[in-house]
Image (tube, rainbow, N blue to C red):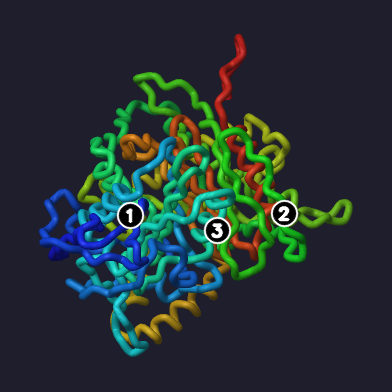
Amino acid sequence: MTALQPARHEPPDGHGASRDSRGTPADGQVAPSVGPRTPPDGRGELSPAPSPSPPSGEGAGGGFGGGGEQSRGSAVAHLPFPVVDEISRHCLDDGEPETVHIEVHLPGRVDPVRLRTAFHQALARHPRILMRQAPVRWWHRRYRWQLTATPDVDPVGFPPPGPGALARARQRALDHCPPLDASPPVRLEVIEGAADGTVLLLTLHHTALDGPACLRVLATAAELYGGADNSPAPAPVRAPGPRPEPLADRPPAPGPRLARPARIAPDTNPASAPTPAPTPAPGSAPRPGRPRHPGNGNGMLLTDLPIPTRPPRTPAQPAPYTVNDQLLVATWLMVARWNRLHAPARPHGAAAPAAAPIVVTMPVDDRPRDAGMPIGNGTRLVSVGFGPEERRDAGPLTADPPDPDAVARLLRRTAARTRALKAAAPGPQLGLYATMLTAPVLPVGLRGAVTRTLRRAAAPWTSTTLLSNIGRIAYPLDFGDAGRPTAVWFSAPARMPRGLTVTTVSVAGRIQLALRWSPALLDDAAGARLGDLFRSSLAATAWTPPPAGGAAR
């Protein structure tokens, strides 16, 4: 399709308006851009239509922003919603706001005016992020994005610093989506003085774009702020090698195709008093507890974990499994052990019911990470099903601790499954049925009603949970005198019937883990216990060197 390139807007630069030390206009209004408008310089993305992402919902509009009135600019182009954006828009639910939260910890302090200017310039270099939903009526055939030349609102905000500022910003990130009717649908809050440095906390509306796209914009802002090259590091090259035991690489059967996936056992106590914030482990950042009731956003736990060891590789052999495989196995172990702990007591001698298979959905992102990365929703979903072999090993796998030999067998089977998924040709994000549902034959109001009905009907076949492994951050995110990140967390929205998402990032040799859960599934105390289970489950996947004369698992 034809690339669209709105004119670049000039960021706030202090001309013609007095500003305070944070770069905010003294009168509290957003200063209009001034000076000549020049087209982007070619370094930015050329505005292809966004690719779909997982369905998501919408929370309350507004939220904490950069201050100032909304001043809607004229639209310079219109784009129809892609398939998954439309499915997401049909399923918006204020009770379960599906924000994506990104948290970047910097060791130093940032200059407020420079950061605001750099972020606005980054928006201009990636103009596809400057979008808002066009007004729509139920009889219209399409939802459409309006691309704008300038932001409708200033997305950069500086909340008052002080004790609890970071906790309050996290709560806003979970409870309040940036509105879709104001450009851009993203919010950047700068928390000064947090952990003797600065925290950049981004909140974005998942109907409009995803986390990797927003991180690309932040990398451009870092380059403009600090002046250092923030080009993505090249992906590691893994030379193929002969694999021993080729029959062992055949992926095991995932079980009956129509079997309903297992659900995570609920554990809530809505009548309980607010839970005190747990004492954080070294290097961790758990979210303070608060009373949870259905409809007031997700709960979240942030912590970091050591990367589990793997067997040493030789030039003639590829690694038997990856860290991603270990994370998949840790997620399976966490859910299986949790459900076993919460299984109802059975009469003596009664046979255990057949266990439903645990199915883990994973987003896969094939986009390039350079300055031309398409901005929008670009991930496709794949599901990793665990079948009869895991049910046969359920006893030793769910023991405390899990049996090492059973875990080793599960790692090998999981590696075979993921290799098969990587070898398969990429398919559409939501398949043929979603494409048919979004065909502009019926009005959007009728299509939305059909989509919501089908979503409820298909709920029992939704996967057990979602694991989003971002992997190593591709960009240095070098903010000059403010430094490079010491920690980065992503969290994906958790909506029923899954009710739980696991998101991981690798930073400085550690895994940054974010658990998010629906208050209809877990309360904060249960979420903390689930985090402990994931920690021990990930540790169980670590390779141990063989003893003298023995064999490693």
Instruction: Report how far apart the C-alphas of labels 2 and 3 lie in the structure.
Output: 15 Å
Is residue 492 or residue 455 the one in the foreground?
A: 492
Give whichever of discs 2 and 3 has the lower sequence position. Answer: 3
Give whichever of discs 1 and 2 has the lower sequence position. Answer: 1
Query: Relative to 472, is 304 on the left or the right?
Result: right
Q: Foreground mark, 3 or 1? A: 1
Query: Which residue is at 29% across, 84% downward?
Result: 141
Is residue 103 or residue 459 the one in the foreground?
A: 103
Give whichever of discs 3 and 1 has the lower sequence position. Answer: 1
Instruction: Report how far apart the C-alphas of labels 1 and 2 lie in the structure.
Output: 38 Å
| Label 1 secondary element | loop
Instruction: Report how far apart the C-alphas of labels 3 and 1 lie in the structure.
Output: 25 Å
Is residue 243 or residue 496 the one in the foreground?
A: 496
Query: Which residue is at 13% across, 65% downward?
Result: 2
Residue tagged 2:
275
Residue 552: percent from left, percent from top: 57, 21
Is 49 placed above or below 193 here? below
Residue tagged 3:
171
On residue 23, which mark appears? 1
Is 487 placed above or below 521 here? above
Could you tell me if residue 417 is visible in this image? no
| Quadrant of res 235 | top left
| Quadrant of res 16 | bottom left
Is the C terminus in the top left, top right, bottom left or bottom right quadrant?
A: top right
Disc 1 packing (10 Å; few <14; some 14–19; many ≥20): many
Q: State if disc 1 and disc 3 touch (CB < 8 Å).
A: no
Query: Which residue is at 43% across, 58% downward?
Result: 203
The amino acid type found where label 3 is placed reads Gln
The amino acid type found where label 1 is placed reads Gly
The amino acid type found where label 2 is placed reads Thr
